Image: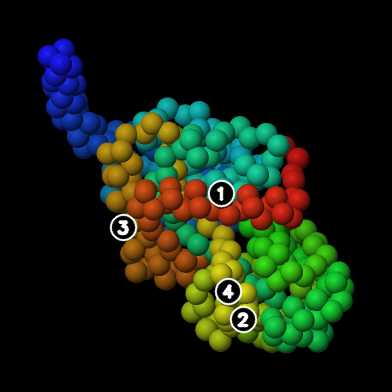
Amino acid sequence: MQRFARALGLLGAAFLAAAPALAQTAADFPKQPIRMVVTFPPGGSADAVVRLLTPRLNEKLGQQVVVDNRPGAGGNVGLALVAKAPADGYTLGVGAAGALSANSSLYPQMPFDSLKDFKPVSMLAAIPFVIVGHPSVPAKTQKDLLAAAKAQPGKFSIGHGGNGTAMHLSAALFAQMADVKFVEVPYRGSGPAALDALAGNVPLAVVDLPSALQHIRAGKLIAYAVTSPQRLPQLPDVPTVAEAGLPGYDSTGWFGVVAPAGTPDAIVAKLNAEITAALNDEQIKTTMRNAGVEPAPTTPAAFDAYIRAETTKWSRVIRQAGIKLDP
């Protein structure tokens, strides 16, 4: 017992000695530029949001946040770099729902474990999708659309932004919950899918808001429902999929910042504080919403819980749909 008590005392002394060092580490951070690995090419929503935030982060952190675009393999290429980087806060990754939750079920081999190799910092943004149709489709509401699809299985094609994307998974979840069969048509991004629906080459599509909003407002595309759990301020009269007859449906694209596993909590907390403060800035929020993305600041713990819940959810959808991608 005395030996045990002595060991506890030594551990306590070591912790007390280390505490000021940890505090000093956070206080001094950062001392050099921070590399932000964005797993998308320049010009996309994630890249645009990061570049919108960096001037404020540069000012508040006192160091440059350098954007490093590393797209490829659904985000796996960029996040693999982050997973192997030193856990010191100077290399961060911006990953999306695919690489951080769905890819572990889509790819036969992964270069990292998204639940073990990263420490979540904060979600950045949520990207709602819209289920749209060409005006020639006889159904004008989700209820009528699903009734027609059930009556004629396989008649309706539904385009999406590419195999394994959040839009693909949104379409798969929609079909599963409605118990209908669509012919899925992958495109190289949301824009091409929306344009083909606009032209009538595919009757239905799941696309992001920026790709479809002007066409919906012009009456050139039917908006059946939005995939998010709440209605969108840009389309206040368009119901959610859940409201329109599929309770519990929720499929939202998202992306956020992660650090390598082992990054000190104090550094993660400091990064989180500055990122969430930027996302709560009214001008930044307005700019993001005008671009069709919703600011989504979170605590590290909340982001971690969300990634885990999304991983479980999409694993079930992917398994049921039989979706697989090549590495």
What residue is shown with label 4? 247
Given residues 70 and 21, the one toward you in this image is 21
Inspect the image, locate mark 2, and give the three-letter code of the amino acid beneath it.
Ala
Inspect the image, locate mark 1, and give the three-letter code of the amino acid beneath it.
Thr
Q: Position of residue 101 (x, y in %)?
A: 56, 48
Residue 277 circle label: 3
Given residues 242 and 295, the one toward you in this image is 242
| Classed neighbour count for the residue bearing mark 3: other residues with Cα under 10 Å, few (<14), some (14–19), many (≥20) | few
Q: Position of residue 147 (x, y in %)?
A: 77, 81
| Front: mark 4 or 3 | 4
Identified at 86% across, 69% down, the residue is 154
Of pointers 4 and 3, the one earlier in the residue sequence: 4
Tags 4 and 2 touching, CB below 8 Å:
no
Q: Quadrant of residue 160?
A: bottom right
| Front: mark 4 or 2 | 4
Relative placement, left or right, of 243 versus 19 is right
What residue is shown with label 2? 244
What residue is shown with label 1? 311
Q: Position of residue 305 (x, y in %)?
A: 43, 50
C-alpha separation, residue under disc 4 versus residue under disc 2? 8 Å
| Label 2 secondary element | loop
Relative placement, left or right, of 165 versus 61 is right
Inspect the image, locate mark 4, and give the three-letter code of the amino acid beneath it.
Pro
| Label 3 secondary element | helix
| Front: mark 2 or 3 | 2
